Amino acid sequence: MSPGMARNVKGGLVQVANAKSEGSVKEIIQAMLEKTLPFVEKAGKAGVQMLCLQEVFNTPYFCPAQTPNWYDAAEAVPGPTTHLLAEYAKKYSMVIVVPVYERAMAGVYYNTAAVIDADGKVLGKYRKNHIPQTAGFWEKYYFKPGNLGYPVFQTQYGVVGVYICYDRHFPEGARLLGLAGAEVVFNPSATVAGLSQYLWKLEQPAHAVANGYYVGAINRVGTEAPWNIGKFYGHSYFVDPRGKFLVEASEDKDELVTADMDFDLIEEVRRTWQFYRDRRPDTYENLVKQIP
């Protein structure tokens, strides 16, 4: 669509607390799915055109311990969960970003987000590239680093990019998503109060400003047994290409938040700042060298 044509897109983010802490992996997944789907319905009925769920949305954040039973939560992508969400996408003509635990083959698992277009077609997936390995976040035990690069997805309403949780600490991928044409980047997350909380409202607005696109940042809420590593503090939000907060969720409530994104603003902001014109990739060669 050419500049000057009105491109207003309603975005939505869903943050919820874990639904069930005891039982089999299958039972816990089913409970979380049943808790989340009413928010998907609510988004559709509210006219949301682009919706994103939280990181591994249909499970707890199981990475505080290294226990192999959670490998049972992994599934093919596309697979059962994406097929189910595709029905909601078609029903409401709504793009849905679906973060799940992906099983690529026996013993190979990824932290993945599928992007479903408004007609129910699965356009593709992003696999989380940056995998932390630290106390409370033993993700390398569960996830292989992504191998699909930084794809963007041309949906019926605009170009979507995805970054997942820990990725947000790395500006390189955020820039690559912008260079590939992303108009909105969704960052589904699971992050608790503590060391990185003050960065929550700094890094992603900075990515939005540096790259001239919208960002939708999602974080779950509540404290999850049996791990109890801390409180997931919510505060999901949208920011525009100027870094302005459009909406922010609460810190402790299951919630759908929505915001109207004016994609025409991207052109206006980039014409003002011209960061893409003034980039000097010829001087950045050390960025891709293996320097200690």
Image: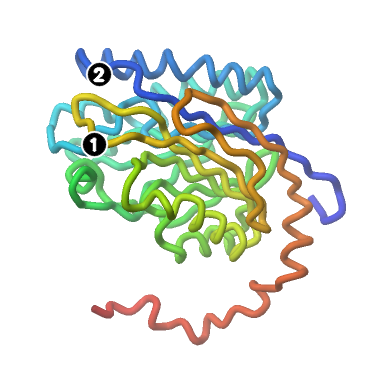
Is 84 or 251 nearer to us in this picture?
Answer: 251
- Left or right position of 142 against 184: left
Residue drawn at (36%, 33%) of the image: 56
The residue depicted at 38 percent of the width and 82 percent of the height is: 286
Furthest-right residue in this view: 4
Provide the secondary structure element on which disc 2 rests.
Answer: loop
**Residue at the location (12% across, 33% down)?**
67
Horizontal placement of 62 versus 184: left or right? left
Mark 1 burial class by Cα count in 10 Å: few <14, some 14-19, many 20+: some
Disc 2 marks a residue whose amino acid type is Ser
Residue at the image position 86 percent from the left and 48 percent from the top: 5
| The furthest residue to the left | 67
Residue placed most toward the observer, 198 or 205: 198
Q: Amino acid at mark 1?
A: Ile
Quadrant (top left/top right/bottom left/bottom right) for the C terminus: bottom left
**Residue 251 location, x and y as percent?**
46, 33
CA gap, disc 1 to disc 2? 14 Å
Percent across and percent down for residue 34 are 42, 13
Q: Earlier in the sequence, mark 1 or mark 2?
A: 2
Instruction: Please give the label number shown on residue 130.
Output: none
Q: Please, what secondary structure does the residue beneath circle 1 have?
A: loop
From the viewer's perspective, is residue 267 above or below residue 108?
A: below
Disc 1 and disc 2 in contact, CB within 8 angstroms: no
- The residue labelled by disc 2 is 21
Q: Which one is nearer the viewer's eye here, 142 or 135? A: 135
User: Which mark is drawn over residue 229?
Assistant: 1
Q: Quadrant of residue 9?
A: top right
